[in-house]
Image (cartoon, grey):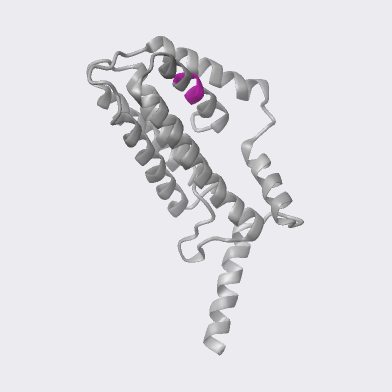
Amino acid sequence: MLGDSRLLLPAAVVLIAFGAFQRSRWSLRWAGSLCVIGTLVLSSKLAFLGWGIGLARVDFTGFSGHATLSALIWPVLLAIGLTARRPHWGAAAGLMLAAAIAYSRLPLNAHSWSEVVSGWLLGASGAVWTLRRLDASPTARPGWLATALVIGALIPLAFPQATTHEAVVRLATTLSGAKDPHARSTLHEKSITLEAKILTD
């Protein structure tokens, strides 16, 4: 739940809107980070699900969306919403929370280490880049944080059956024309076949 894009993205949009209204310097940078990094994550997933493009050697089929968005959004949410004088404490707490969310994907076999670590690093880089534009004396806005999280939480509650993964799968198969999305097992099968062919040539 804490790493669900249906919670995090609406919450980020709400906070960006508040920041833009106050003409805060970080809001535009965060919006840009979300767009660029979100595009990278989506592209990596579409490439694998639709065309089977991945890295078998490191078991990579695309950046973990949970890891990436958690590391990109939670540090900014907590830095702006909780800590007025020392926003870096909120940012550090957000990064640790994101790391825990990222790690939780491993026991579920939802992602590999390469997908989780690369996703966390990608998201964290966007969060750090955003937080460098905080005002010299930022004022904590607990009301902003509460409003953002409440609005974000309403989305998964209102649509409990809808998932972003299903939408990405449908988009990938539509764009590629594939009957079924590629699976992780097929990536390794292709790699083994290619290695065997190279050895026999």
Front-most of 37 and 85? 37
Rendered view: 118 above or below 156? below
Q: Is residue 11 rendered to the left or right of residue 117?
A: right
Q: Residue furthest bottom?
A: 201
Q: Residue at x 69, y 30 (%)?
A: 161
Q: Residue at x 45, y 13 (%)?
A: 146
Question: What x and y, as percent, mark residue 145?
Answer: 43, 16
Q: Is 170 on the left or on the right of 139, as rendered?
A: right
Q: Magenta stretch containing residue 13, yes or no?
A: yes
Q: Position of residue 27 (x, y in %)?
A: 40, 25
What predominant SS class does the magenta segment belong to? helix
Viewer-side residue, 71 vs 175:
175
Left or right: 10 as drawn, with respect to 176: left
| Residue 125 vertical position relative to residue 114 in the rendered view, above or below | above
Figure label count? 0
Location of the C terminus by quadrant is bottom right
Q: Residue at x 40, y 48 (%)?
A: 117
Name which quarter of the figure residue 180 lies in: bottom right
Residue 160, horizontal then vertical, whole percent: 66, 27
Rendered location of residue 150, percent (x, y): 52, 15
Name which quarter of the figure residue 153 lies in.
Answer: top right
Report the front residue among 81 and 93: 81
Q: Is residue 73 above or below residue 182?
A: above
Q: Hey, which residue is sitting farthest front in the picture?
A: 23
Query: Which image quadrant for residue 137?
Result: top left
In depth, the one of 28 and 129 nearer the eye is: 28
Please state the extent of the stretch shown in magenta in the rendering.
Answer: 11-15
Q: Residue at x 36, y 34 (%)?
A: 127
* Residue sticking out furthest to the right: 179
